[in-house]
Amino acid sequence: MAALITENFRFLSLFFKSKDVMIFNGLVALGTVGSQELFSVVAFHCPCSPTRNYIYGLAAIGVPALALFVIGVIWNNHTWNLVAECHKRGTKNFSAAANFLIFGSVMGRAAVAPVTWSVISLLRGEAYVCALSEFMDPTSLDHFPPGYGPDILARFPCEDQPANMTHFKDEVIRRLRYESQLFGWMLIGAVAVLVFITKCLKHCCSPLSYRQEAYWNQYRSSEARLFQQTAEVSHSFCHLRETVILGKHPTYLRTLAVRS
Protein backbone atom coordinates (compact mmCIF):
# COMPACT_ATOMS: atom_id res chain seq x y z
CA MET A 1 0.00 0.00 0.00
CA ALA A 2 2.79 2.41 0.88
CA ALA A 3 4.57 1.59 -2.39
CA LEU A 4 1.37 2.27 -4.35
CA ILE A 5 0.90 5.66 -2.65
CA THR A 6 4.55 6.52 -3.33
CA GLU A 7 4.16 5.65 -7.01
CA ASN A 8 1.00 7.74 -7.25
CA PHE A 9 2.71 10.75 -5.71
CA ARG A 10 5.66 10.28 -8.05
CA PHE A 11 3.33 10.15 -11.04
CA LEU A 12 1.54 13.34 -9.94
CA SER A 13 4.88 15.07 -9.39
CA LEU A 14 6.07 14.16 -12.89
CA PHE A 15 2.74 15.22 -14.37
CA PHE A 16 2.81 18.66 -12.78
CA LYS A 17 6.47 19.15 -13.68
CA SER A 18 5.68 18.37 -17.33
CA LYS A 19 2.71 20.78 -17.25
CA ASP A 20 4.43 23.66 -15.48
CA VAL A 21 3.62 26.14 -18.26
CA MET A 22 -0.04 25.15 -18.25
CA ILE A 23 -0.24 25.47 -14.46
CA PHE A 24 1.51 28.84 -14.54
CA ASN A 25 -0.90 30.14 -17.18
CA GLY A 26 -3.85 28.85 -15.18
CA LEU A 27 -2.65 30.61 -12.04
CA VAL A 28 -2.13 33.83 -13.99
CA ALA A 29 -5.63 33.56 -15.42
CA LEU A 30 -7.16 32.95 -11.98
CA GLY A 31 -5.26 35.90 -10.52
CA THR A 32 -6.47 38.09 -13.37
CA VAL A 33 -10.08 37.02 -12.81
CA GLY A 34 -9.82 37.91 -9.13
CA SER A 35 -8.24 41.28 -9.93
CA GLN A 36 -10.96 42.05 -12.46
CA GLU A 37 -13.70 41.21 -9.98
CA LEU A 38 -12.06 43.42 -7.35
CA PHE A 39 -11.69 46.25 -9.86
CA SER A 40 -15.36 46.01 -10.86
CA VAL A 41 -16.50 46.21 -7.25
CA VAL A 42 -14.08 48.83 -5.92
CA ALA A 43 -12.78 51.02 -8.73
CA PHE A 44 -15.26 50.93 -11.63
CA HIS A 45 -17.68 53.86 -11.61
CA CYS A 46 -19.23 54.90 -14.90
CA PRO A 47 -19.30 58.73 -15.24
CA CYS A 48 -22.74 58.57 -16.95
CA SER A 49 -21.89 61.56 -19.14
CA PRO A 50 -21.81 61.84 -22.95
CA THR A 51 -18.35 61.41 -24.52
CA ARG A 52 -16.89 60.48 -21.11
CA ASN A 53 -18.67 57.15 -21.00
CA TYR A 54 -17.05 55.96 -24.21
CA ILE A 55 -13.52 56.89 -23.15
CA TYR A 56 -13.93 55.52 -19.63
CA GLY A 57 -15.46 52.23 -20.80
CA LEU A 58 -12.76 51.55 -23.37
CA ALA A 59 -10.05 52.56 -20.90
CA ALA A 60 -11.47 50.16 -18.29
CA ILE A 61 -11.07 47.31 -20.78
CA GLY A 62 -7.94 48.27 -22.69
CA VAL A 63 -5.60 50.05 -20.28
CA PRO A 64 -5.39 47.28 -17.62
CA ALA A 65 -5.00 44.70 -20.39
CA LEU A 66 -2.12 46.70 -21.89
CA ALA A 67 -0.50 47.11 -18.47
CA LEU A 68 -0.76 43.37 -17.78
CA PHE A 69 0.75 42.61 -21.18
CA VAL A 70 3.74 44.89 -20.57
CA ILE A 71 4.27 43.44 -17.08
CA GLY A 72 4.12 39.92 -18.52
CA VAL A 73 6.79 40.78 -21.09
CA ILE A 74 9.03 42.40 -18.47
CA TRP A 75 8.76 39.51 -15.99
CA ASN A 76 9.59 36.86 -18.58
CA ASN A 77 13.25 35.83 -18.39
CA HIS A 78 13.27 34.92 -22.08
CA THR A 79 12.72 38.59 -22.91
CA TRP A 80 16.04 39.62 -21.45
CA ASN A 81 17.77 36.54 -22.85
CA LEU A 82 16.55 37.59 -26.29
CA VAL A 83 17.67 41.20 -25.76
CA ALA A 84 21.09 40.10 -24.50
CA GLU A 85 21.48 37.69 -27.42
CA CYS A 86 20.65 40.39 -29.96
CA HIS A 87 23.00 42.86 -28.27
CA LYS A 88 25.86 40.35 -28.06
CA ARG A 89 25.70 38.83 -31.52
CA GLY A 90 24.25 41.75 -33.45
CA THR A 91 22.25 41.48 -36.64
CA LYS A 92 24.91 39.55 -38.58
CA ASN A 93 24.79 36.37 -36.50
CA PHE A 94 21.11 36.79 -35.69
CA SER A 95 19.25 33.47 -35.84
CA ALA A 96 15.84 34.50 -37.08
CA ALA A 97 14.08 31.16 -36.58
CA ALA A 98 15.29 30.54 -33.02
CA ASN A 99 14.67 34.10 -31.89
CA PHE A 100 11.27 34.12 -33.53
CA LEU A 101 10.31 31.05 -31.48
CA ILE A 102 11.53 32.74 -28.29
CA PHE A 103 9.65 35.91 -29.22
CA GLY A 104 6.48 33.91 -29.84
CA SER A 105 6.86 32.18 -26.48
CA VAL A 106 7.26 35.54 -24.72
CA MET A 107 4.23 37.03 -26.46
CA GLY A 108 2.13 33.95 -25.80
CA ARG A 109 2.79 33.93 -22.07
CA ALA A 110 2.39 37.69 -21.78
CA ALA A 111 -0.97 37.56 -23.56
CA VAL A 112 -2.62 35.23 -21.01
CA ALA A 113 -3.45 37.92 -18.44
CA PRO A 114 -4.66 40.66 -20.86
CA VAL A 115 -6.81 38.25 -22.84
CA THR A 116 -8.35 36.95 -19.61
CA TRP A 117 -9.00 40.52 -18.46
CA SER A 118 -10.65 41.45 -21.76
CA VAL A 119 -12.79 38.30 -21.82
CA ILE A 120 -14.02 38.74 -18.24
CA SER A 121 -14.74 42.43 -18.87
CA LEU A 122 -16.79 41.59 -21.96
CA LEU A 123 -18.66 38.75 -20.26
CA ARG A 124 -19.59 41.01 -17.34
CA GLY A 125 -20.63 43.74 -19.75
CA GLU A 126 -20.43 46.68 -17.36
CA ALA A 127 -17.67 48.54 -19.19
CA TYR A 128 -19.24 47.83 -22.58
CA VAL A 129 -22.63 49.12 -21.42
CA CYS A 130 -20.98 52.23 -20.00
CA ALA A 131 -19.08 52.90 -23.24
CA LEU A 132 -21.87 52.40 -25.76
CA SER A 133 -25.11 53.28 -24.00
CA GLU A 134 -25.13 56.82 -25.46
CA PHE A 135 -24.80 55.43 -29.00
CA MET A 136 -27.98 53.35 -28.84
CA ASP A 137 -30.45 54.38 -31.54
CA PRO A 138 -33.63 55.67 -29.78
CA THR A 139 -35.74 54.79 -32.82
CA SER A 140 -34.99 51.09 -32.24
CA LEU A 141 -36.84 51.28 -28.91
CA ASP A 142 -40.62 50.96 -29.06
CA HIS A 143 -42.55 54.00 -27.79
CA PHE A 144 -39.41 55.87 -26.79
CA PRO A 145 -40.44 59.42 -25.78
CA PRO A 146 -39.34 62.10 -28.27
CA GLY A 147 -37.00 64.83 -27.14
CA TYR A 148 -34.55 62.53 -25.35
CA GLY A 149 -31.13 61.95 -26.84
CA PRO A 150 -27.61 60.85 -25.90
CA ASP A 151 -27.74 62.80 -22.64
CA ILE A 152 -30.42 60.58 -21.13
CA LEU A 153 -29.03 57.42 -22.76
CA ALA A 154 -25.63 58.05 -21.22
CA ARG A 155 -27.23 58.03 -17.76
CA PHE A 156 -28.75 54.56 -18.20
CA PRO A 157 -25.77 52.71 -16.59
CA CYS A 158 -26.44 54.75 -13.42
CA GLU A 159 -29.52 55.18 -11.28
CA ASP A 160 -30.23 58.86 -11.91
CA GLN A 161 -32.71 58.83 -14.78
CA PRO A 162 -36.42 59.74 -15.00
CA ALA A 163 -38.91 57.19 -13.73
CA ASN A 164 -40.52 56.79 -17.15
CA MET A 165 -37.14 55.64 -18.53
CA THR A 166 -36.81 52.52 -16.36
CA HIS A 167 -38.29 50.17 -18.96
CA PHE A 168 -36.09 51.57 -21.73
CA LYS A 169 -33.05 51.42 -19.47
CA ASP A 170 -33.54 47.70 -18.89
CA GLU A 171 -33.97 47.12 -22.61
CA VAL A 172 -30.82 49.06 -23.52
CA ILE A 173 -28.70 47.33 -20.89
CA ARG A 174 -30.02 43.93 -21.97
CA ARG A 175 -29.11 44.57 -25.62
CA LEU A 176 -25.65 45.91 -24.85
CA ARG A 177 -24.86 43.04 -22.49
CA TYR A 178 -25.93 40.63 -25.21
CA GLU A 179 -23.48 42.26 -27.63
CA SER A 180 -20.72 42.39 -25.01
CA GLN A 181 -21.06 38.72 -24.06
CA LEU A 182 -21.24 37.75 -27.73
CA PHE A 183 -17.94 39.50 -28.37
CA GLY A 184 -16.49 37.82 -25.27
CA TRP A 185 -17.41 34.32 -26.44
CA MET A 186 -16.13 35.14 -29.94
CA LEU A 187 -12.82 36.23 -28.41
CA ILE A 188 -12.59 32.96 -26.47
CA GLY A 189 -13.23 30.98 -29.64
CA ALA A 190 -10.70 32.98 -31.64
CA VAL A 191 -8.02 32.53 -28.98
CA ALA A 192 -8.72 28.78 -28.78
CA VAL A 193 -8.40 28.39 -32.56
CA LEU A 194 -5.23 30.50 -32.59
CA VAL A 195 -3.64 28.41 -29.83
CA PHE A 196 -4.56 25.19 -31.66
CA ILE A 197 -3.08 26.42 -34.96
CA THR A 198 0.06 27.64 -33.20
CA LYS A 199 0.59 24.28 -31.47
CA CYS A 200 0.09 22.44 -34.75
CA LEU A 201 2.57 24.68 -36.59
CA LYS A 202 5.07 24.34 -33.77
CA HIS A 203 5.04 20.53 -33.89
CA CYS A 204 4.95 20.44 -37.70
CA CYS A 205 7.96 22.75 -38.06
CA SER A 206 9.97 21.16 -35.25
CA PRO A 207 12.73 18.72 -36.33
CA LEU A 208 12.05 16.68 -33.19
CA SER A 209 9.27 14.21 -32.63
CA TYR A 210 6.71 14.75 -29.88
CA ARG A 211 8.49 12.41 -27.45
CA GLN A 212 11.89 13.86 -28.28
CA GLU A 213 10.63 17.38 -27.64
CA ALA A 214 9.05 16.29 -24.34
CA TYR A 215 12.35 14.70 -23.33
CA TRP A 216 14.25 17.85 -24.33
CA ASN A 217 11.92 20.08 -22.29
CA GLN A 218 12.31 17.80 -19.28
CA TYR A 219 16.09 17.85 -19.72
CA ARG A 220 16.14 21.66 -19.87
CA SER A 221 13.97 21.86 -16.76
CA SER A 222 16.31 19.48 -14.89
CA GLU A 223 19.37 21.45 -16.02
CA ALA A 224 17.82 24.74 -14.88
CA ARG A 225 16.94 23.24 -11.50
CA LEU A 226 20.45 21.79 -11.10
CA PHE A 227 22.00 25.15 -12.03
CA GLN A 228 19.86 26.90 -9.43
CA GLN A 229 20.84 24.40 -6.74
CA THR A 230 24.54 24.76 -7.66
CA ALA A 231 24.26 28.55 -7.51
CA GLU A 232 22.68 28.36 -4.06
CA VAL A 233 25.39 26.00 -2.81
CA SER A 234 28.10 28.27 -4.22
CA HIS A 235 26.53 31.26 -2.54
CA SER A 236 26.42 29.44 0.81
CA PHE A 237 30.03 28.30 0.42
CA CYS A 238 31.19 31.85 -0.40
CA HIS A 239 29.35 33.20 2.61
CA LEU A 240 30.92 30.53 4.86
CA ARG A 241 34.36 31.23 3.46
CA GLU A 242 33.93 34.94 4.06
CA THR A 243 32.90 34.43 7.68
CA VAL A 244 35.89 32.12 8.27
CA ILE A 245 38.35 34.56 6.70
CA LEU A 246 36.99 37.46 8.72
CA GLY A 247 37.20 35.41 11.93
CA LYS A 248 33.46 35.34 12.60
CA HIS A 249 32.88 31.62 12.33
CA PRO A 250 32.56 29.78 15.72
CA THR A 251 34.83 26.90 14.65
CA TYR A 252 37.53 29.34 13.62
CA LEU A 253 37.23 31.23 16.91
CA ARG A 254 37.53 28.02 18.93
CA THR A 255 40.64 27.06 16.95
CA LEU A 256 42.21 30.40 17.74
CA ALA A 257 41.36 30.01 21.43
CA VAL A 258 42.96 26.55 21.59
CA ARG A 259 46.10 27.75 19.83
CA SER A 260 46.44 30.71 22.17
Image (tube, grey):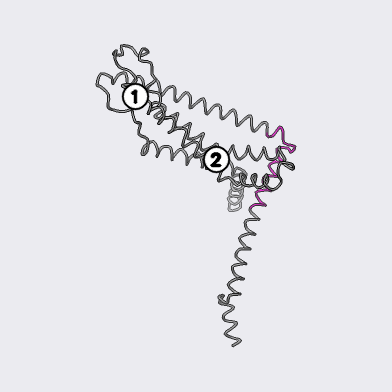
Residue at image location 53% in from the left, 40% down from the top: 70
Q: Amino acid at mark 2?
A: Asn
Q: Residue furthest left?
A: 163
**How dense is the environment of label 1, judged by Cα within 10 Å: few (below 14), some, or many (20 and up)?**
many
Quadrant hosting residue 163: top left
Residue at image location 44% in from the left, 25% down from the top: 180
Q: State yes or no: discs 2 and 1 in contact (Cβ < 8 Å).
A: no
The spot of residue 205 in percent (x, y) is 72, 33
Q: Amino acid at mark 1?
A: Ala
Compute the Cα span from label 2 to label 1: 38 Å
The residue tagged with tag 1: helix, strand or loop?
Answer: loop
Left or right? Give the position of 153 relative to 120. Answer: left
Query: In the displayed structure, would residue 4 be above or below residue 52?
Result: below
Residue at image location 57% in from the left, 85% down from the top: 257
The spot of residue 113 in percent (x, y) is 51, 38
Query: Label 2, on which residue?
Result: 25
Q: Nearer the viewer, mark 2 or mark 1?
A: 1
The spot of residue 161 in percent (x, y) is 27, 24
The residue tagged with tag 2: helix, strand or loop?
Answer: helix
Front one among 243 and 74: 74
Which quadrant is the C terminus positioned in?
A: bottom right
Residue at image location 25% in from the left, 18% down from the top: 164
Magenta highlight range: 202-224
Residue 206 covered by magenta stretch = yes
Query: In the displayed structure, would residue 167 be above or below residue 215?
Result: above
In the rendering, which numbered label is found on residue 235? none
**How dense is the environment of label 2, judged by Cα within 10 Å: few (below 14), some, or many (20 and up)?**
some
Secondary structure mostly taken by the magenta-highlighted segment of the chain: helix
The spot of residue 104 in percent (x, y) is 63, 37
Q: How many marks?
A: 2
Query: Label 1, on which residue?
Result: 154
